[in-house]
């Protein structure tokens, strides 16, 4: 992925730049894997209240700048990346040991036979296993 400039992201999405948003986005851009609320809070290095943080995360999510991953642990994790960077879906790898979530490039769509009359709106692929750090 080419170098992403924060300014560019804010400009392209018509988002107001605030100190908090700059820290938040910077933290997500530099992260090598999906970040939980606690990861983000630590990564930002500033005091921020929970509802403010979640409000800004959902603003970014609505703008398509970041995506949320629900790894079924009950903790939502967030990763930088417009969905179209991946031309459709990409998979998430969840390490069962350290609970780290990684965005994984998915080279082909899964083939699933939906029953007649069902309309799919998206597929979330979760791969469980052990990561290279564990
Ligand atoms: Zn691991
Ligand atoms: Zn992802």
Image: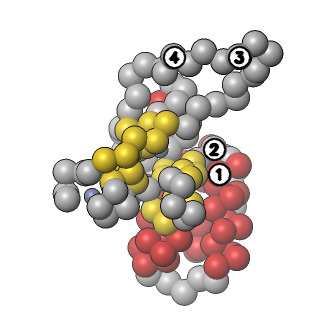
Quadrant containing ligand 1 reads bottom left
Answer with mark 2 or mark 3, whichever residue precedes in sequence. 2
Label 2 to label 3, Cα distance in Å?
30 Å
Q: Could you tell me residue 123's position as x and y percent? A: 58, 32
Q: Secondary structure at mark 2?
A: loop
Q: Which residue is mark 1?
A: 61
Which mark is in front, 1 or 3? 3
Answer with mark 1 or mark 4, whichever residue precedes in sequence. 1
Label 4 to label 2, Cα distance in Å?
26 Å
Q: Which residue is mark 4?
A: 111
Vertical position of residue 75 compared to residue 102: above or below: below
Kindly tell me whether mark 1's CB lies below 8 Å from ligand 2.
Answer: no
Which mark is in front, 4 or 2? 4
Which mark is in front, 2 or 3? 3
Label 3 to label 4, Cα distance in Å?
13 Å
Q: Could you tell me residue 45's position as x and y percent? A: 44, 81
Label 1 to label 3, Cα distance in Å?
31 Å
In the figure, is residue 64 to the left or right of 23?
Answer: right
Cβ–Cβ under 8 Å for marks 1 and 2: yes
């Amino acid at each position: 992925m080419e170098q992403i400039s924060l300014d560019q992201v804010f400009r392209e999405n018509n988002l107001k730049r605030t100190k908090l948003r700059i820290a938040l986005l910077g933290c997500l851009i530099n992260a090598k894997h999906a970040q939980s609320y606690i990861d983000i809070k630590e990564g930002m290095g500033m005091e921020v209240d929970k509802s403010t943080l979640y409000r800004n995360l959902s603003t970014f999510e609505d703008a398509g700048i970041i995506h949320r991953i629900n790894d079924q642990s009950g903790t939502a994790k967030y990763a930088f990346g417009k969905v179209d960077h991946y031309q459709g879906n990409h998979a998430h790898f969840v390490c069962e040991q350290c609970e780290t979530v990684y965005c994984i490039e998915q080279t082909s769509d899964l083939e699933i036979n939906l029953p007649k009359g069902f309309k799919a709106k998206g597929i979330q692929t979760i791969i469980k296993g052990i990561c290279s750090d564990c």
